Image (cartoon, helix red, strand yellow):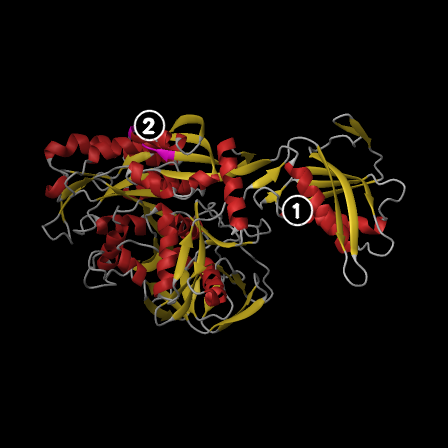
Amino acid sequence: MKIYKTKEIKNIALLGSKGSGKTTLAEAMLFECGVIKRRGTVGAGNTVTDYFPVEKEYGYSVFSTVFYAEFLNKKLNVIDCPGADDFVGSAITALNVTDTGVIVVNSQYGVEVGTQNIFRTATKLHKPIIFALNQLDGEKADYENVMEQMRETFGSKVVAVQYPLACGPGFNAMIDVLLMKKYSWGPDGGTPKIEEIPDAEMPKALELHKALVEAAAENDDTLMEKFFDDTPLTEDELRLGIRLGLVKNSIYPVFCVSAEKDMGVRRMMEFLGNVVPFVDEMPAPVDVQGNEVAPDPAGPLSLFVFKTTVEPHIGEVSYFKVMSGTLKAGMDLDNVTRGSKERLAQIFCVCGQIRTAIDELQAGDIGAAVKLKDVRTGNTLDEKGCEIAFDFIKYPAPKYQRAIRPVTEADAEKLSQILTRMHEEDPTWVVEQSKELKQTLLKGQGEFHLRTLKWRVENNDKLPVVFEEPKIPYRETITKAARADYRHKKQSGGSGQFGEVHLIIEPYTEGMPAPDSYRFGNQEFKMNVRDTQEIPLAWGGKLVVCNCIVGGAIDARFIPAIVKGLMDRMEQGPLTGSYARDVRVCIYDGKMHPVDSNEISFRLAARNAFSEAFRASNPKVLEPVYDVEVHTPADVMGDVISDLQGRRAIIMGMESDNGFEKVIARVPLKEMSNYSTALSSITGGRSSFTMKFASYELVPADVQDKLLKDYAESNAE
């Protein structure tokens, strides 16, 4: 295989909603450049890019797949990304390591929520965007309607490069207003017939050509002058203007294709090869020190590992981008992220599971290595003496979680190792060992996302697992002051146990003054604060302990034991066993025995006194509440709001967002358990949402009563 120079390499992410036809388009691209002799289909399970068993089982893309196309003496590295919103992490990764996004739009359904989400991510990363209107041969295809939707959603930068002469099953011809030619195909697609534009189409073609020329000329002063002088732009000048516009995000060209019939694919690839920016024409990425790292083949060698997988019959495969320098097979590199060394004995260019060994990869190129000993997703590998490190991919917060456990308890350690490996493959799978909930929590982007992991654990690793409803991390607090005392006394042969603690608890707020006195009934308790400890709690809030002991009723050496007893109860609240927070405790009296008093006695006395006072202080349970944003089509917004209100949501606002409606709400975490699935069902998969922790709020009285009852029953058992 030819070794391509940096100025001959283009990196492209193939993006779009589920069902838009990206995998079929990838097959057509591979066929057009001669990598495969026969195109596979998703239905037959024989495509180059969907080759994992789980993808064949479910019939849709689960992982991003890297492939390359040698075309017009250039190398196009393409990453085909899953369309389902659950696997958005792959699309985010691909956009970060490529230079142009091709967003595939299903012409039968137009702009979908997934299309909008991908577009938003791509523009946030300042990536050039090209739209490919696919399935123009579909029964419901409507080019004009989709173009209108796109202009409404994405603005006037959307510019047609082609338009079809007819949509639906009769689609077999289009007008290219960049080259001003008519393209037509036979029933089997493939090589087009190129002709002059018919007279009947010339007015429309000229109008769209003028709009394209104007959009291209806006990016260069010289071209703009020629445009105002009515001087025709040459084909090369048009290409230059469009390339500059792509880099500036000032133009979004639109192409027409039928990937299934291989119509228009070759023409779009010609545009990718001739017009879209090369690696070195894009803004340079920035390392962790904030320094730009230009893709210079003569610079220091640095690789960024953006993806790792465990593939059938191969083992671990690490996919990387050469950020700087020139990589040669057999080189020794330092893993600056993990502090280890790696030898890349062989390096490969990949097309799905087809690997081609190559001797050299220059800056900007994408390759792979197998069976590296200590490399994970997100690691940087540098040559000796190079101190470049990258950490530029930011993943979205999880939206769906389940507790996971093995069917056989003895397999817990094995499951932990598998989940760690899965997270290293896909960082959007987040694993948390919750000490508070006593569960292993698996978090992801949706039900499909977690179901895919479960399928792989059970089928690839042969380990049966169970998903369970995750417990909710409630908090307990108090709303008024209360007093209690407790004597712990235990006598057996020899020395016994004795400790007595008198304390007052009250709600704590930041900056409140030191206690002076308290009144309970007709009795007043004066406080003389000798010492105050503020203990920040790992789960939020504080425990503040005021030592108000006078006259040596309790020796100072027992105070730490009393604080430990208080913390015992803060870690396991008296109401539901949840963490307690924001409590101030005044220890004002007690008793001790010259022989029987010890630390355990005062620790137990403090625990029980605290529990009694807590129950008398009008305690409340707090629940985690999340800020939720739902992007949905207007026609189902009423159903979305109604469902949210049924989940105890408070609707905070609504606004329009590029053709979609955005509903903003605050929802208790308890009610979000199956929201991903419910939203998909309500809206036919056309909506998406994000959620972010907001605060802890009081649960309603009926919910609290149920929680207390359930906790009492579980303790009785």
Q: Which mark is residue 254?
A: none
Tell me which amino acid carries mark 1: Arg
Residue 563, image x and y in percent? 74, 47
Q: Nearer the viewer, residue 590 or 284?
A: 590
Compared to residue 178, the image places residue 40 above or below, namely: below
Q: Residues within 10 Å of mark 1 (few under 14, many from 20)?
A: many
Tell me which amino acid carries mark 2.
Gly
Identify the image quadrant of the N terminus: bottom left
Residue identifier under label 1: 569
Label 2 to label 1, Cα distance in Å? 45 Å
Vertical position of residue 190 compared to residue 154: above or below: below
Q: Residue at x 51, y 41 (%)?
A: 709
Q: To which quarter of the image does residue 578 belong?
A: top right
Q: Is residue 474 left or right of residue 534?
A: left
Residue 132 in the image, given as x and y percentages of width and height: 27, 44
Judge whether residue 156 can be spotted in this image.
no
In the picture of the structure, the residue carrying the numbered disc 2 is: 638
Residue 634 is one of the magenta-drawn residues = yes
**Is 145 in front, or is 656?**
656
Q: Residues within 10 Å of mark 2 (few under 14, many from 20)?
A: few
Q: Is residue 454 left or right of residue 435?
A: left
Q: Which residues are magenta?
A: 631-635
Q: Position of residue 453 (x, y in %)?
A: 39, 57
The residue depicted at 74 percent of the width and 48 percent of the height is 605
The image quadrant that residue 677 belongs to is top left
